[in-house]
Amino acid sequence: MKTCVVTASFACDPSKLWLYLTKPTLNGWRKDVRDYEEKDGGLHVIEHNTDGSTTELHFTRREKPRCLSCNFQNGKVNGTFTLILLGGGDSTSLECTMEVSGLGLFAKPKKLLEERLNMLRAAVGA
Protein backbone atom coordinates (compact mmCIF):
# COMPACT_ATOMS: atom_id res chain seq x y z
CA MET A 1 0.00 0.00 0.00
CA LYS A 2 1.36 3.42 -0.99
CA THR A 3 0.05 6.66 0.50
CA CYS A 4 0.56 10.26 -0.55
CA VAL A 5 -0.81 13.70 0.25
CA VAL A 6 -0.74 16.62 -2.20
CA THR A 7 -1.93 20.20 -1.61
CA ALA A 8 -2.57 23.00 -4.09
CA SER A 9 -4.04 26.50 -4.16
CA PHE A 10 -6.38 27.88 -6.80
CA ALA A 11 -7.58 31.43 -7.43
CA CYS A 12 -11.24 30.52 -7.87
CA ASP A 13 -14.37 29.53 -5.95
CA PRO A 14 -14.56 25.96 -4.52
CA SER A 15 -17.80 25.41 -6.47
CA LYS A 16 -15.92 25.77 -9.76
CA LEU A 17 -13.32 23.21 -8.70
CA TRP A 18 -16.08 20.88 -7.46
CA LEU A 19 -17.77 21.03 -10.87
CA TYR A 20 -14.56 20.02 -12.68
CA LEU A 21 -13.67 17.34 -10.14
CA THR A 22 -17.08 15.64 -10.38
CA LYS A 23 -17.43 15.93 -14.18
CA PRO A 24 -14.17 14.53 -15.63
CA THR A 25 -15.06 15.26 -19.27
CA LEU A 26 -16.14 18.88 -18.67
CA ASN A 27 -14.37 21.03 -21.28
CA GLY A 28 -11.89 18.16 -21.83
CA TRP A 29 -9.95 18.81 -18.59
CA ARG A 30 -9.19 15.09 -18.05
CA LYS A 31 -7.25 14.14 -21.17
CA ASP A 32 -7.16 10.49 -20.07
CA VAL A 33 -10.97 10.07 -19.82
CA ARG A 34 -12.95 9.49 -23.03
CA ASP A 35 -16.38 9.47 -21.33
CA TYR A 36 -18.01 8.50 -18.07
CA GLU A 37 -21.33 7.32 -16.70
CA GLU A 38 -22.96 8.08 -13.36
CA LYS A 39 -25.20 5.73 -11.40
CA ASP A 40 -27.01 5.98 -8.05
CA GLY A 41 -27.21 9.77 -8.18
CA GLY A 42 -23.48 10.15 -8.83
CA LEU A 43 -22.33 7.84 -6.02
CA HIS A 44 -21.07 5.23 -8.51
CA VAL A 45 -19.06 6.50 -11.49
CA ILE A 46 -17.43 4.55 -14.31
CA GLU A 47 -14.74 6.39 -16.27
CA HIS A 48 -13.92 5.02 -19.73
CA ASN A 49 -10.28 5.88 -20.30
CA THR A 50 -8.64 6.67 -23.63
CA ASP A 51 -6.38 3.60 -23.28
CA GLY A 52 -9.45 1.30 -23.24
CA SER A 53 -9.43 0.63 -19.51
CA THR A 54 -12.13 1.63 -17.05
CA THR A 55 -11.95 3.10 -13.57
CA GLU A 56 -14.83 2.49 -11.17
CA LEU A 57 -15.37 4.93 -8.32
CA HIS A 58 -17.72 4.35 -5.40
CA PHE A 59 -18.15 7.56 -3.42
CA THR A 60 -18.45 7.21 0.34
CA ARG A 61 -18.62 10.98 0.94
CA ARG A 62 -19.81 13.62 -1.46
CA GLU A 63 -20.40 16.85 0.44
CA LYS A 64 -20.74 19.63 -2.14
CA PRO A 65 -18.54 21.67 -2.51
CA ARG A 66 -16.19 20.69 0.31
CA CYS A 67 -15.32 16.98 0.42
CA LEU A 68 -15.13 13.95 -1.86
CA SER A 69 -14.10 10.51 -0.72
CA CYS A 70 -14.22 7.29 -2.72
CA ASN A 71 -12.92 3.78 -3.28
CA PHE A 72 -11.62 3.11 -6.79
CA GLN A 73 -10.67 0.16 -8.98
CA ASN A 74 -8.65 0.29 -12.21
CA GLY A 75 -7.70 -3.22 -13.36
CA LYS A 76 -5.67 -4.79 -10.55
CA VAL A 77 -5.11 -1.41 -8.90
CA ASN A 78 -7.41 -0.32 -6.11
CA GLY A 79 -7.42 2.19 -3.31
CA THR A 80 -9.07 5.15 -1.64
CA PHE A 81 -9.05 8.84 -2.47
CA THR A 82 -10.10 11.81 -0.34
CA LEU A 83 -10.24 15.42 -1.46
CA ILE A 84 -10.94 18.40 0.81
CA LEU A 85 -11.63 21.91 -0.52
CA LEU A 86 -11.02 24.79 1.89
CA GLY A 87 -11.66 28.49 1.39
CA GLY A 88 -14.23 30.45 -0.53
CA GLY A 89 -14.79 33.43 -2.78
CA ASP A 90 -11.84 33.64 -5.12
CA SER A 91 -9.36 31.47 -3.21
CA THR A 92 -9.43 27.72 -2.59
CA SER A 93 -6.94 25.29 -1.08
CA LEU A 94 -7.26 21.68 -2.07
CA GLU A 95 -5.81 18.69 -0.21
CA CYS A 96 -5.78 15.21 -1.77
CA THR A 97 -4.93 11.98 0.02
CA MET A 98 -4.58 8.70 -1.89
CA GLU A 99 -3.83 5.17 -0.74
CA VAL A 100 -3.08 2.68 -3.50
CA SER A 101 -2.61 -1.07 -3.63
CA GLY A 102 -1.48 -2.80 -6.82
CA LEU A 103 0.71 -2.07 -9.80
CA GLY A 104 0.30 -0.20 -13.05
CA LEU A 105 -0.92 3.32 -13.72
CA PHE A 106 -1.14 4.24 -10.04
CA ALA A 107 2.33 2.93 -9.07
CA LYS A 108 3.40 6.54 -8.37
CA PRO A 109 0.33 8.12 -6.74
CA LYS A 110 2.00 11.46 -5.91
CA LYS A 111 3.10 11.98 -9.52
CA LEU A 112 -0.38 11.04 -10.73
CA LEU A 113 -2.07 13.50 -8.35
CA GLU A 114 0.31 16.30 -9.33
CA GLU A 115 -0.44 15.66 -13.03
CA ARG A 116 -4.20 15.81 -12.35
CA LEU A 117 -3.81 19.07 -10.41
CA ASN A 118 -1.83 20.59 -13.29
CA MET A 119 -4.62 19.56 -15.70
CA LEU A 120 -7.19 21.05 -13.31
CA ARG A 121 -5.22 24.31 -13.00
CA ALA A 122 -5.11 24.63 -16.79
CA ALA A 123 -8.82 23.80 -17.12
CA VAL A 124 -10.08 26.36 -14.60
CA GLY A 125 -7.52 28.97 -15.57
CA ALA A 126 -6.42 29.49 -11.98
Image (cartoon, rainbow, N blue to C red):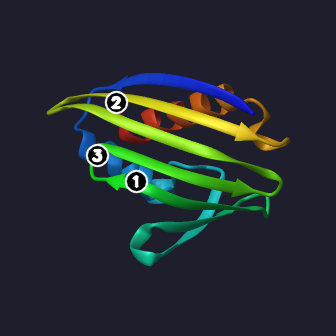
The label on residue 16 is 3
The disc labelled 2 sits on which kind of residue?
Answer: Ala
Residue drawn at 58 percent across, 27 percent down: 114
Q: Going 27% across and 30% down the picture, which residue do you hit?
A: 86
Q: CA distance from mark 1 to mark 3?
A: 18 Å
Measured from the top left, where is residue 24 in percent x and y?
50, 56
Question: To which quarter of the image does residue 107 belong?
Answer: top right
51 vs 35, left or right, is right
Q: Quadrant of the C terminus?
A: top left
Amino acid type, mark 1: Arg
Q: Which residue is mark 1?
A: 61
Instruction: Give the side of residue 103 with respect to residue 110, left or right.
Output: right
Which is more N-terminal, label 3 or label 1?
A: 3
Where residue 66 sits: x, y (%)?
A: 29, 43
Query: How far is the residue under mark 2 from the one under mark 3?
Result: 10 Å
- Label 3 residue SS: helix
- How far across and how far down the image is residue 40, in percent? 45, 77
Quadrant that contains the N terminus: top right
- Graded by Cα atoms within 10 Å as few (under 14), some (14 to 19) or many (20 or more), the crowding at tag 3 reads few
Would you name the residue on which mark 2 appears? 126
31 or 113, which lies in front? 113
Residue type (three-letter) at the residue carrying disc 3: Lys
Tell me the distance, in whole angstroms, between the alpha carbons under discs 1 and 2. Answer: 26 Å
